[in-house]
Amino acid sequence: MNAKSLSAGDFIDARCTRCRVITNHTIIAMVGDTVAKVKCNTCDGAHKYHPPKAPAKPRATASGSSTSAASTKRSQSAAAKKLSADLEEWVTFSRDADPTLAKAYDMNSGYKAGDLLDHSVFGIGIIKAIFKPNKMEVLFQDGKKLLRCKL
Ligand SMILES: [Zn+2]
């Protein structure tokens, strides 16, 4: 016999469509062995049952990027704003980076991938890649930008 056999009135963890987090719910309707409807014990909202684990979304990967970013997947606290992968990366490096080491941006200077850049408009960024003959991709808080540089 299954240890777990759910029925209406039982408590279950589910994703609340209103709270947008995993909260404790009370089952209000079952269809066979499947939980159909639940009521959130936090906001009292009744809605379809959404399992606590959100379905994995295909993540857009940066084209041509071979960096295996150590994907530190934390349990999604839904209260936290969803960060884009780029912003997450920026936050990670800027936390460890020493801004005093950043080189002021000058389109007539040469740079290399991994250098910190201090841009008058975009702020601190990290150089992700250099493209011949005179472009570089820099990750700023706003996202990736292509900037001119000298090789
Ligand atoms: Zn709720």
Image (tube, rainbow, N blue to C red):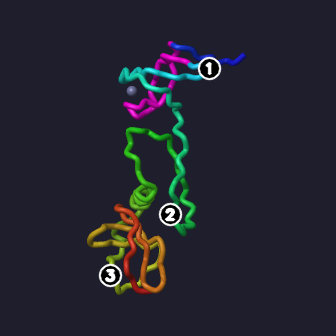
Front of the two marks 2 and 3: 2
Q: Is residue 144 left or right of residue 121?
A: right
Residue that numbered label 2 is attached to = 62
Q: Which element is circle 2 on?
A: loop
The tag earlier along the polypeptide, 3 or 1, is 1
- Going 37% across and 65% down the picture, which residue do you hit? 140
- Where residue 27 appears, as percent x and y from the top left, is 50, 18
| Whether residue 2 is situated above or below residue 88 in the rendered picture | above
Does the magenta portion include 16?
yes
Q: In the image as oriented, which residue stretches furthest toward the left?
A: 120
Q: Quadrant of residue 122?
A: bottom left
In the rendered image, the quadrant that contains the C terminus is bottom left
- Where residue 90 appears, as percent x and y from the top left, is 41, 60
Looking at the rendering, the quadrant in which ligand 1 lies is top left
User: Of residues 79 and 40, which is closer to you in this image?
Assistant: 40
Task: Name which residue type carries label 3.
Answer: Asp
Task: Mark 3: give few (<14), some (14-19) or many (20+) Cα within 10 Å.
Answer: some
Question: What is the magenta range?
Answer: 9-30
The tag earlier along the polypeptide, 2 or 1, is 1
Residue that numbered label 3 is attached to = 106
Q: In the image as oriented, which residue stretches furthest toward the right?
A: 1
| Mark 2 vs mark 3, CA separation in Å | 26 Å
Task: Mark 1: give few (<14), some (14-19) or many (20+) Cα within 10 Å.
Answer: few
Assess mark 3: CB under 8 A from ligand 1? no
The tag earlier along the polypeptide, 2 or 3, is 2
Residue that numbered label 1 is attached to = 33
- Where residue 105 appears, as percent x and y from the top left, is 33, 77
Task: Name which residue type carries label 2.
Answer: Ala
